[in-house]
């Protein structure tokens, strides 16, 4: 199988790192293009894969082609490569807001199309990616794509109408979590803890809490109640968070994220 990437930023880099670490493909089975000779050199040095300055060359040589550029460049890239794409290839989009119908309309012909929404924890092998496909992608072909995506985290196949929700709950949510970690650390620093230590305590607490949800299968509310002793310190902190609208702020932020994704 020949796998191609048009664009090789953070998400493509995370996928490449996982693919090579898991030995899913050999380096000479992967080809990538970037916008400049300098970034192309960086990709070669980092991953040792085949590279090209021509997007058309990558499109022509790929059985599975990942469009890993920012959403605002999709129309330009598709216009450039669409004549090179055949109905036997699988085109994978990682752009929010670009529906399967939108992609097919821009290519101007029926193609095998997969949409996915990864997130930046893929950089450390802990990503989760939502995936959907059009009717031309067969089960075995979808599994090929998912196998690639699973090299840097979890993968969930779902209906396309949920893809904008995936953007809010996983694609964008690392930023909310980083903001929370930063706020927790700031508070710890205000109470006298050195900053590096504060970041470590806050980050490990969130990592461990997430593992408890995933590994115990218990409802998050039940796990929260386990920490909240009657008249204790934790329930007092929870009371203040609720008073300040913490839960509502998170919900409204995620709903705003979905609205933005739908409008892209």
Image (cartoon, rainbow, N blue to C red):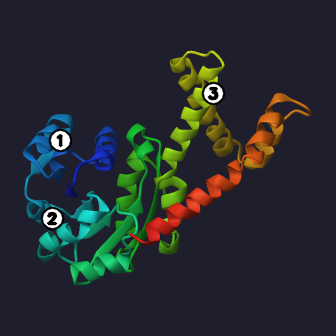
Vertical relation: 96 (above or below) 37? below
The residue positioned farthest toward the right in the image shown: 230
Residue sitting at x 57%, y 63%:
255
Local SS, label 2:
helix
Question: What residue would you read off at disc 1?
Answer: 43
Res 256 → quadrant = bottom right
Residue sitting at x 31%, y 65%:
92
Question: Disc 2 vs disc 1: Cβ atoms closer than 8 Å?
Answer: no
Residue sitting at x 46%, y 54%:
171
Label 3 neighbourhood size at 10 Å, few (<14), some (14-19), many (20+)?
Answer: some
Percent across and percent down for residue 125 are 42, 40
Res 145 → quadrant = bottom left
Tell me, for residue 187, which label it has, or none.
Answer: 3
Q: Earlier in the sequence, mark 2 or mark 1?
A: 1
Vertical relation: 168 (above or below) 84? above
Label 1 neighbourhood size at 10 Å, few (<14), some (14-19), many (20+)?
Answer: many
Question: What residue would you read off at disc 2?
Answer: 59
Local SS, label 3:
helix
Local SS, label 1:
helix
Question: Disc 3 vs disc 2: Cβ atoms closer than 8 Å?
Answer: no
Residue sitting at x 82%, y 35%:
236
Numbered disc in front, either 3 or 1: 3
Label 2 neighbourhood size at 10 Å, few (<14), some (14-19), many (20+)?
Answer: many
Percent across and percent down for residue 29 are 18, 51
| Image mark count | 3
Direction from residue 198 to residue 243 in the image, left or right:
right
Q: Earlier in the sequence, mark 3 or mark 2?
A: 2
Whether residue 69 is visible, yes or no, is yes
115 or 176, nearer to the observer: 176
Numbered disc in front, either 3 or 2: 3
Q: Earlier in the sequence, mark 3 or mark 1?
A: 1
């Amino acid at each position: 199988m020949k796998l191609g990437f048009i664009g090789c930023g953070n998400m493509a880099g995370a996928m490449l790192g996982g693919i090579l670490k898991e030995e899913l493909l050999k380096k000479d089975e992967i080809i990538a293009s970037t916008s400049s000779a300098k970034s192309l050199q960086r990709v070669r040095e980092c991953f040792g894969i085949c590279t090209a300055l021509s997007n058309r060359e990558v499109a022509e040589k790929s059985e599975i082609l990942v469009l890993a550029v920012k959403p605002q460049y999709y129309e330009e890239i598709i216009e450039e490569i669409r004549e090179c794409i055949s109905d036997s290839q699988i085109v994978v989009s990682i752009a929010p807001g670009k529906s399967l119908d939108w992609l097919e309309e821009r290519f101007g012909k029926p193609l095998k199309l997969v949409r996915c929404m990864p997130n930046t924890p893929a950089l450390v092998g802990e990503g989760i990616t939502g995936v959907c496909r059009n009717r031309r992608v067969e089960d075995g072909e979808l599994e090929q794509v998912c196998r690639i995506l699973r090299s840097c985290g979890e993968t969930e196949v779902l209906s396309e109408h949920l893809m904008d929700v995936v953007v809010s709950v996983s694609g964008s949510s690392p930023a909310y979590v980083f903001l929370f970690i930063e706020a927790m650390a700031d508070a710890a620093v205000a109470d006298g803890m050195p900053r590096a230590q504060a970041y470590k305590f806050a980050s490990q607490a969130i990592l461990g809490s997430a593992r408890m949800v995933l590994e115990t299968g218990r409802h998050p509310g039940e796990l929260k109640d386990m920490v909240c002793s009657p008249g204790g310190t934790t329930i007092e902190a929870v009371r203040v968070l609720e008073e300040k609208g913490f839960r509502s702020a998170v919900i409204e932020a995620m709903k705003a994220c979905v609205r933005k994704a739908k409008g892209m």
